[in-house]
Amino acid sequence: MRKITTSRDDIDHHKSPMNADIKFEGQPLAKLGPATQYEERNIIIKSPSSSCELDPLPKYLLKEVLEYLLPLITAIINRSLVESTVPLSFKKANIRPLL
């Protein structure tokens, strides 16, 4: 439940800015159109079902509820492309050194 609350707080695409630390200032891609739900669905379905502890939702579960979340996922991606920003919460990673 905490992951859901955190995700909602981090990604409120209607009210708050994307909270990116650095906005891209270069030349935007001229031929890149908005992402479609069809494209996003295919990418998610074809991706492996493995997950990371940073994922707010395990990928196997995402695939089960994809039709409900797809409009939100597509809106986040398109907003990121339009604003040339990426939310800080999307830039976290767990690094595990191999010995």
Image (cartoon, grey):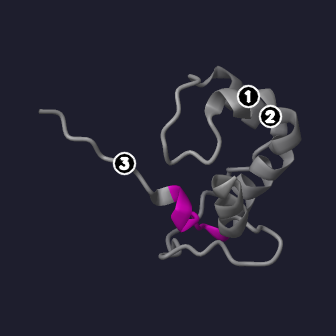
Whether the magenta-drawn stretch holds residue 59 is answered as: no
Whether the magenta-drawn stretch holds residue 87 is answered as: yes
Residues at discs 1 and 2 in contact (Cβ within 8 Å)? yes
Identify which residue, 88 or 54, lies in the foreground. Answer: 54
User: Against 1, is 88 above or below?
Assistant: below
Tag 1, which secondary structure? helix
Which residue is label 2 attached to? 66
Query: Amino acid type of disc 1?
Result: Lys
Q: Which mark is residue 44?
A: none
Is tag 1's residue or tag 3's residue first in the polypeptide sequence? 1
Query: Amino acid type of disc 3?
Result: Asn
User: Against 65, is 74 above or below?
Assistant: below
User: Against 15, is 35 above or below?
Assistant: above
Q: Quadrant of residue 27?
A: bottom right
Residues at discs 2 and 3 in contact (Cβ within 8 Å)? no
Is tag 2's residue or tag 3's residue first in the polypeptide sequence? 2
Residue at 73% from the left image edge and 28% from the top image edge: 63
Q: How many discs appear?
A: 3
**Residue span colored magenta:** 83-90
On the image, the x and y values in percent for residue 53 come to 49, 43
Give how far apart the Cα atoms at labels 1 and 2 are: 5 Å
Query: Amino acid type of disc 2?
Result: Leu
Which residue is label 3 attached to? 94
Q: Is residue 81 visible?
A: no
Which residue is label 1 attached to? 63
Residue at 54% from the left image edge and 62% from the top image edge: 89
Residue at 52% from the left image edge and 26% from the top image edge: 50
Tag 2, which secondary structure? helix
